[in-house]
């Protein structure tokens, strides 16, 4: 996810306020499993879902002086 910094003149100088926590995107596969005698005998894919990454958003007061680097990590795991 990316980091976005927005200057808010209503905040005191140097103040930081997290508006939205960032999170990596991820995939979810849902299966139906039929188990007989403790063993999986049939496995069927029911749904495939993808959740997009969500950016980290930070409000800052004027005078905030920190170098910002965009972080673009997307965790992508098949389960």
Image (cartoon, grey):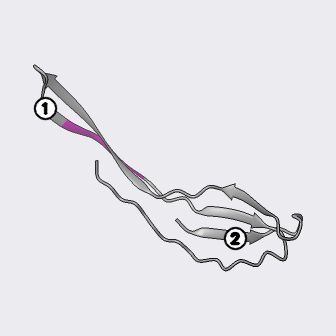
Q: Main secondary structure of the magenta part?
A: strand
Name which residue lies at 56% across and 75% down.
Answer: 70
Give the distance between the C-alpha atoms of the residues marked 2 and 1, in whole angstroms: 49 Å
Pick the front one: 5 or 52:
5
Where residue 42 appears, as percent x and y from the top left, is 13, 32
SS of the residue under disc 1: strand
Name which residue lies at 56% across and 68% down.
Answer: 2
Tag of residue 5: 2
Determine whether, in the image, residue 67 is placed left or right of residue 44: right
Name which residue lies at 66% across and 63% down.
Answer: 57
Task: Using the image, determine if residue 68 lies above or below residue 39.
Answer: below
In which image quadrant can residue 63 be found? bottom right
> Residue placed farthest to the top in the image?
37
In which image quadrant can residue 36 be found? top left
SS of the residue under disc 2: strand
Queried whether the magenta region covers residue 47, the answer comes back as yes
Q: Which span of residues is magenta-colored?
A: 44-50
* Number of other residues with Cα within 10 Å of mark 1, as a class: few under 14, some 14 to 19, many 20 or more: few
Chain-order first, disc 2 or disc 1: 2
Tag of residue 30: none
- In front: label 2 or label 1: 2
Where residue 79 appears, as percent x and y from the top left, is 28, 47
Queried whether the magenta region covers residue 58, the answer comes back as no
Pick the front one: 30 or 37:
37
Where residue 26 appears, as percent x and y from the top left, is 41, 54
Residue under label 1: 42
Task: Using the image, determine if residue 16 lies above or below residue 43.
Answer: below
* Number of other residues with Cα within 10 Å of mark 2, as a class: few under 14, some 14 to 19, many 20 or more: some
In which image quadrant can residue 7 be found? bottom right
Determine whether, in the image, residue 5 is placed left or right of residue 70: right
Where residue 13 appears, as percent x and y from the top left, is 87, 70
Pick the front one: 58 or 52:
58
């Amino acid at each position: 996810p990316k980091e976005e910094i927005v200057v808010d003149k209503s905040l005191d100088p140097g103040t930081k306020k997290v508006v939205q926590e960032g999170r990596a995107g991820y995939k979810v596969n849902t299966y139906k499993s039929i188990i007989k005698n403790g063993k999986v005998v049939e496995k069927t894919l029911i749904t495939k879902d993808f959740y997009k990454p969500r950016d980290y958003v930070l409000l800052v007061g004027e005078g905030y002086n920190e170098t910002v680097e965009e972080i673009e990590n997307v965790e992508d795991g098949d389960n």
